[in-house]
Amino acid sequence: MEQKSIADIRRELEQTAFDERTALYVRYQSDSRSGVQKLLESFHKKDDKLLAEKERLEGMRIFERQYEQEGYVCGIDEVGRGPLAGPVAAGAVILPKDCEILYLNDSKQLSAKKRELLYDEIMEKAVAVGIGMVSPAVIDEKNILNATYEAMRIAISKLSITPDVLLNDAVTIPGIGIRQVPIIKGDAKSVSIAAASIVAKVARDRLMEEYEKVFPGYGFAANKGYGSAQHIKALRELGPTPIHRRSFIKNFI
């Protein structure tokens, strides 16, 4: 029988599912061509990395597994508590049982490009997603903590399905009649909270990029309202915009 070309073997490996490649490894391990052996080694390394990622994700399902018998489990997280401008945002995400979204993690640990890709996958696979935002004016009126709680309540209210358990990143939200489980550093320990973190982060970042067009000069597209050197310089030279948090900028104007 004519030997397959290395290109054909590569194609065969690429077209075979991760958990079905073992048979191909066994078939080609006796091929003496160095190109084939290097190819097998390369795919083995990829599979090892993928297996490690799947195991990491399984470890992040511990809370979802613990509460899934109670019904719909929803992750809650917020972003934007620290910026000088823009809203505080919260995400609420209910994922299907055994949902696999590779590389899901705390949004702060991901690049902007990776967050965008994961955002699309979350929106496609989630059972329900809610996003809540609270304006700078309300932040000034109620303080950032109460405004954050309000953003979380809004996010929950926008879910198309009422959850039975809320997995929260570290906080207990006042005024919610649903069982809550606060988890310290939950965005790195729960797939649902990580998904909520990403959804909230991408939604808020996109809004700040739009604000850049409305209020040029502050660098909102790059700094997302945080106190970068460019932002503070512009704040002193141009003054505050309607989206600045007056209670946050007292030291700069």
Image: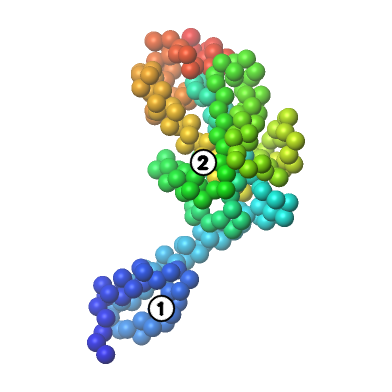
Dot 2 corresponds to which residue? 198
Name the foreground residue: 127 vs 55: 127
Residue type at the position of mark 2: Ile
Q: How is the image coloured?
A: rainbow
Percent position of residue 158, x then y? 59, 35
* Label 2 environment density (alpha carbons within 10 Å; few <14, some 14–19, many ≥20): many
Dot 1 corresponds to which residue? 25
Q: Is residue 2 left or right of residue 76?
A: left
Residue sitting at x 31%, y 70%: 11
Asked where in the image residue 58 lies, by quadrant, the reply is bottom right
Q: Earlier in the sequence, mark 1 or mark 2?
A: 1
Residue sitting at x 26%, y 90%: 1
Residue type at the position of mark 1: Tyr
Q: CA distance from mark 1 to mark 2?
A: 37 Å
Percent position of residue 104, x then y? 52, 50
Residue sitting at x 57%, y 24%: 134
Please state the total of marks drawn on the protein image: 2
Percent position of residue 163, x then y? 67, 43
